[in-house]
Amino acid sequence: MKIGVISLGCAKNLVDTENVLGLLRQSNQEIVTSYDDADAIIVNTCGFIDAAKSEAIETILDVADYKQKNLKKLIVMGCLAKRYKPQLEEEMPEVDRFISIDEYASMGSILTEVLGVKISNNYGLTPRVLSGKPWMAYLAISDGCNNRCAFCAIPFIRGNLHSQPMDKILEEARRLASTGVKEITLVAQDCTRYGFDFDGKSHLSELLKELDQIEGIAWIRMLYMYPDEMEDGLIETIKNSKHVLPYFDIPTQHGSSAVLKRMRRKTSREQIIDRVNKIREEIPDATLRTTMIAGFPEETLEEHAESLSLVKQLQWNRLGIFTYSREEGTAAYDMDDNVPQEEKERRRKEIMDAQEIIGISLLQKEIGTVQEVLIERVDPLTQMYIGRSAKMAPDNVDGNVRFHPLKDHQPGEFATVKITKVSGANLIGDEVA
């Protein structure tokens, strides 16, 4: 059977998609990339915020149109299917089956029933099929979350924290390395709490030390590290690693302790400042990235100013900021969402304008440095190579490095590049011997 799979949302969703692709390949089904060629299409959805939900619905409807042509079966899985399954089943009869996240253990049996072809029932146990660049992979170390932030629906979608056994993570990392993967990005709702569900303490440092020993993996980075669990020992582990990059993705969400308390965050402005200062003290060239929310319920102008001042004080390398949107089922849903959308946008823009100046200033300091660059493609117009330095994550938000080569390269190779100038969010340079 010819089956297409569409993945929406975050890197954790992508790992789920790749597990499904692994099932299909093991079951000798043909994986296709064109709607026109597919007998069946599986859409893996995100249901976290309004924009993601809208994208998911639009994608499902676009795919459903092909049922008037060649498409025989349409299956929807993922966060949207988990969060709104009864409503979706009633309102979207064109979908043959919605598969909730808590049904993944029976994925093979469900697909067998819906598609009418035999699909192996060992989701997550068979090698997944990487759907992106063959030299990099995401590696999920846990799923779910116990933090219960007031604005976040993830615990209601993904459930409580459940960490992958360390031996399973290491086995997967070794397998990926054996296939030519050179960069691994660890993902979780909260990487810093990896292993808390084992015995009430973090085992992230222990995991990193083991991953650091795997031959063939050149870069190891993490996304989503919470400041309240970023102990000195973890910073020391990263500092002393050979392959774990000093790349700290720390979602702070706000700069006011009062707002952080209303958000039910387990941290304060002072603790955020302390952790960032500690990182920079121990690892001066560390890369720090954060996300924030503008216009949280009852946010005053003074509290917004605290967020703005924190951004200016800490000088993040990169920052993303979103306007608050109400999510049913969360503690903040019943709060007084009293900041008008226009004002939320103004506050968001004010912080982003400040960050743009900071980001450009920090990029200017890269001029003259020599950096290792993982090559990803060639610009057909300029013939310059395009890749990423260790300071740039693979999720397309950190910019890239463009350079003039000394010799021919293949994507997935490393090159040594001297940075000569800045262009927007990107660095320009020349390869050096």
Image (cartoon, rainbow, N blue to C red):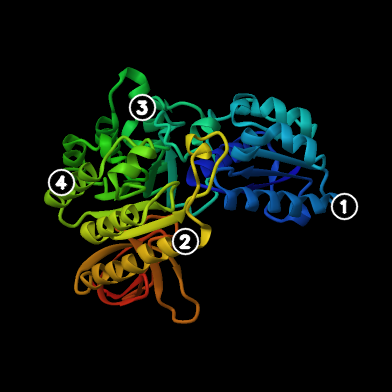
The amino acid marked with disc number 3 is Met
Residue drawn 33% across the image and 24% down it? 196
Q: Residues within 10 Å of mark 2 (few under 14, many from 20)?
A: few
- Mark 2 to mark 1 CA distance (whole Å): 44 Å
Residue in the foreground of this view, choosing between 330 and 107: 330
4 and 2 marks in contact (CB < 8 Å) = no
Give the residue number, with chain letter if any, for mark 2.
343
Give the residue number, with chain letter if any, for mark 3.
166
Discs 2/1, front: 2
Say which mark, if any, is on residue 112: none
Discs 2/3, front: 2
Residue drawn 21% across the image and 68% down it? 370
Q: Earlier in the sequence, mark 2 or mark 1?
A: 1
**Element assignment for label 1:** helix
Residue 162: x and y, percent? 44, 25
Is 115 placed left or right of 335 in the picture? right
Residue in the foreground of this view, choosing between 193 and 215: 193
Give the residue number, with chain letter if any, for mark 1.
68
Give the residue number, with chain letter if any, for mark 4.
278
Among all residues in the image, which is located at the extreme bottom?
A: 382
Q: Earlier in the sequence, mark 2 or mark 3?
A: 3
Discs 4/3, front: 4
